[in-house]
Amino acid sequence: AETLDTVKIRRLSLNRNQISKEGLSCILSSQNARYLTSLMISDNEDIGSAVIDEIARFLSRATTSLKLLEVGSHRQCFRIVWFEKLCQSLQNNTTMSKMSIVGSLHGPIEIFISNEQRKNMEKYMADLMKSFGITCCCENGSKIDDIINSATKIKFPHALHLNLDKCREIGLVLSRCKMLQELCLNGNRGSFREDMLVALFLEEGPYNFPLKSLDLGNNQFGTRELTTILPFLKSWEALNSLSVEGNCINNRGAQLLAEVLDTVRIRRLSLNRNQISKEGLSCILSSQNARYLTSLMISDNEDIGSAVIDEIARFLSRATTSLKLLEVGSHRQCFRIVWFEKLCQSLQNNTTMSKMSIVGSLHGPIEIFISNEQRKNMEKYMADLMKSFGITCCCENGSKIDDIINSATKIKFPHALHLNLDKCREIGLVLSRCKMLQELCLNGNRGCLGEEMLVALFLAEGPYNFPLKSLDLGNNQFGTRELTTILPFLKSWEALNSLSVEGNCINNRGAQLLAEVLDTVRIRRLSLN
């Protein structure tokens, strides 16, 4: 400050020191402080309201020349009320063009203030508040308090390290909302602890807004934390969309969610990537208001198994169900054809379903759209659906899945997505049901088709009873040892006229084995590239 009494410094950077309100007051009261055009004072001692008041008074002075201000702290949440004070001080300010705020709820933000915006600073507030993740429906000329009162959406996707301090600030903001309909706190980097959820949803409550959508996905909290906010969830009669995907919720947590569905008519429920199995799902689907669900996402939970599929199939078969969208399956487990059959059978008398997303099928993730026309003749539609599993058939209209597999002429998995032992066993089971298969393509697996995988594919369920003409095992990184394993399978196909084993690790010994195949089978096309 003594230096500024004698020198007209324009740019002063004090970031990352130990200066608090008293020190800052000295600097801003110095004789030549009015000549400062850039002031950086972030990451100093406890920022507090006193520091913000000091800065706001300085900005309000008629003599100030300040154009750029950097304020805040990475160690402390920058309060909305502090932002309000700074904005109020800018009402009559004619010089400021940029304000950088460190440690806001939404991470570091930069606010640029033009002459046009300065003419109607209050109008500009609604855009500024979006920097804090707050979207409102207020008219032009509203103050920050009006903006928060009329906020319809608060969104923090992939939140930057939410901590207890920031959660308390969000709780204070929520307590001021009157029209909030959508709240998104998705993807906190670190687990939402019990005290953080209390600060968010209970400390400043009960809240007084018509919440319709709540997204708490990917926050790594479990059943204990869910128990904490259960009264909050039950209190929202208007809530129609709830996402708790990507957490650690188990069957006990699913029972708690079922209690929510006993009191609230939720339409969209996302439970992907949790630890819920058949028992937990049964509680949810048996809840009083489960019949109002229109979208249910339950993929990548605990072992999916036939019991889970049976539970979903029973739910789809109910006359009262409203479900339109279902997401099911697991990236860790092969989705069985028999499970698909059960789901399709349950759709025979269903009048609402329009889309089914299956994760972990043999052919990768697939989406099935079901129109009213297709629903009228679901069995006819099956042949098209089975193509999603790489199965092409020659059956007539009206065939069931069993008929489709029986009459399949072609099974094709080009550039197969990470075939593993589980998927190979499933393909083996499908092959054992085929009667007319002529073409089989398993080209381009990402990873070696090992000996046990080839056994599962070609020998475990055999001998097979179809007239195979074309076999493509190219680009699978297997060698002579694996070729030896399937030699009996290759020799058994008298009708085989096309064989591709290109892009593998077959040596001269493997070539001798292929010669043995050509001693018994009249192959026309042979690819050894």
Image (spheres, rainbow, N blue to C red):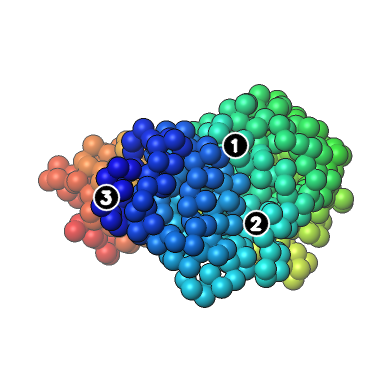
Name the N-terminal-most of marks 1 and 2: 2
Q: Amino acid at mark 2?
A: Ile
**Residue at the spot x=23%, y=54% of the render?**
503
109 or 152, which is in the foreground? 109
Name the N-terminal-most of marks 2 and 3: 3
Q: Quadrant of the C terminus?
A: bottom left
**What label sits on residue 499 in the rendered view?**
none
Q: Are marks 2 and 3 in contact (CB under 8 Å)?
A: no
**Residue 444 in the image, given as x and y percentages of width and height:** 32, 54
Task: Say whether residue 408 is visible.
Answer: no
Left or right, 45 with respect to 484, comes to right
Left or right, 183 with respect to 263, comes to left
Name the N-terminal-most of marks 1 and 3: 3
Q: Amino acid at mark 3?
A: Thr
479 or 113, which is in the foreground? 113
Is disc 3 surrounded by few (<14), some (14 to 19) or many (20+) residues within 10 Å? few
Q: Which residue is mark 3?
A: 6
Q: Which residue is mark 1?
A: 167
**Residue 293 in the image, given as x and y percentages of width and height:** 78, 49
**Residue 381 in the image, given as x and y percentages of width and height:** 67, 65
Task: Say whether residue 184 is visible.
Answer: yes
Is disc 2 surrounded by few (<14), some (14 to 19) or many (20+) residues within 10 Å? many
Q: Quadrant of the N terminus?
A: top left
Q: Which residue is mark 2?
A: 144
